[in-house]
Amino acid sequence: MYLIRMLLMLAFILGTLACNSAESDSTGIAKAQSPAASTPDDRTIGISQQQIDAAMEHALKIDSQRCWNYVKQFVAIGSRPLGSAAHKKAEDYIHAHLKGDHVEDDVFNQSTPQRSLPVRNIVAKYPGKKPGIVVFASHYETNIWLPQTYVGANDGGSSTGLLLEFASLFRNQVKSGPMEGYSVWLVFTDGEEAMQRDWSSDSLYGSKHLAQKWQQDGTSKQIKALLLADMIGDADLNIEQDGNSSSRLQMIALTAAGHYGYQSHFYGRQTAVEDDHLPFAKAGIPVMDFIDLDYGYNNSFHHTPEDTLDKLSPKSIQIAGDSMLGTLALLNADAK
């Protein structure tokens, strides 16, 4: 098993060096860039094999059926663009499932090519004993320019359900006091989707606002990692090797995935993804995007009314969720 892990890490490093050749995605979400996070020092995990084994032994795992129920209930709300009644229902659904938790809302009005619209980032906080914070994030709204039949089952729905499952797990962990390890924050970002089809400047409204806020108030210096989930429900799951994510975090995630035998679902493709993690990376926070950008043949389901529950798999969400929680466990074991 140890030899297999080392071979996987070697393959990952070689793949990282190839990321500069990524081509632009037709949606405008993935664009080739020079991956700023890929430095030699970032390619070492810094955790002994003994620490890895001990940490993974105690890593949390999701309840896949409960998580799938969250996804189904949330997607049933339907199309939920900014400013819509369904968007308010989505906010209310998230808040209802965070009842009793420490929740803070980052609310502001955003000027967009459509009009000025209210944006609400929802942040749930679970204390830990170790100084520092690990953030799990996901956006929950849908595109305003798509038809009302668009429900965003994968794009927004799958990852929102996963974060609500994380909330259930962490809520149970803090019943008797702070958790072992870092504090965990769950961030339901808003305004990730472009108001029009031009992605370049018309997107990531919620994450840009929150990243700026955290940089100004000093929170960004306390965050050890931000792990973003997006489009993780695809029945044919393949998490991208992202040139805009920390190489070290991606190696840690691969180690966690390999512990469960999930490594074949990681890094089959290399690209540089533009997503909610970018503003936080610019604020100096180590980031990783857990995302599968090839949704359907030639990405045919992405941003279409075909993004429905029947295209998803609870197993895919479990693979992503358990790998993210395993990454947390390994970060908690890391002395850095």
Image (spheres, rainbow, N blue to C red):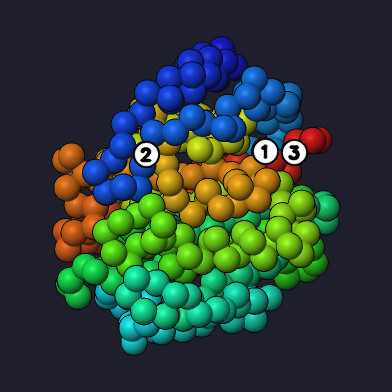
Residue under the point 53% across and 50% down: 277
Q: Earlier in the sequence, mark 2 or mark 3?
A: 2
**How far is mark 1 from mark 2, CA to CA?**
30 Å
Q: Earlier in the sequence, mark 1 or mark 2?
A: 2
In the rendered image, residue 320, in percent from the top left (x then y), is placed at 45, 46
Q: Nearer the viewer, residue 112 or 271?
A: 112
**How far is mark 2 from mark 3, CA to CA?**
34 Å
Residue 5 placement: quadrant = top right
Q: Nearer the viewer, residue 119 or 186?
A: 119
The residue beneath circle 2 is 31
Q: Residues within 10 Å of mark 1 (few under 14, many from 20)?
A: many
Q: Residues within 10 Å of mark 2 (few under 14, many from 20)?
A: some
Q: Quadrant of the C terminus?
A: top right
In the rendered image, residue 271, in percent from the top left (x then y), is placed at 39, 33
Answer yes or no: is residue 318 visible. Answer: no
**How far is mark 1 from mark 3, CA to CA?**
5 Å
Q: Amino acid at mark 1?
A: Leu
Q: Amino acid at mark 2?
A: Lys
Helix, strand or loop at label 2? It is loop
Helix, strand or loop at label 1? It is helix
Answer yes or no: is residue 118 visible. Answer: yes
Residue under the point 46% across and 69% down: 190
Q: Nearer the viewer, residue 190 or 326?
A: 190
Q: Are marks 1 and 3 in contact (CB under 8 Å)?
A: yes
Q: Amino acid at mark 3?
A: Ala
Residue under the point 37% across and 23% down: 21
Q: Is residue 135 left or right of residue 231?
A: right
Residue 50's place in the image compared with 249, above or below, is: above
Q: Name the mark on residue 333.
A: 3
Question: Which numbered mark, 1 or 2, is in the foreground of this view?
Answer: 2
The residue beneath circle 1 is 330
Q: Name the mark on residue 110.
A: none
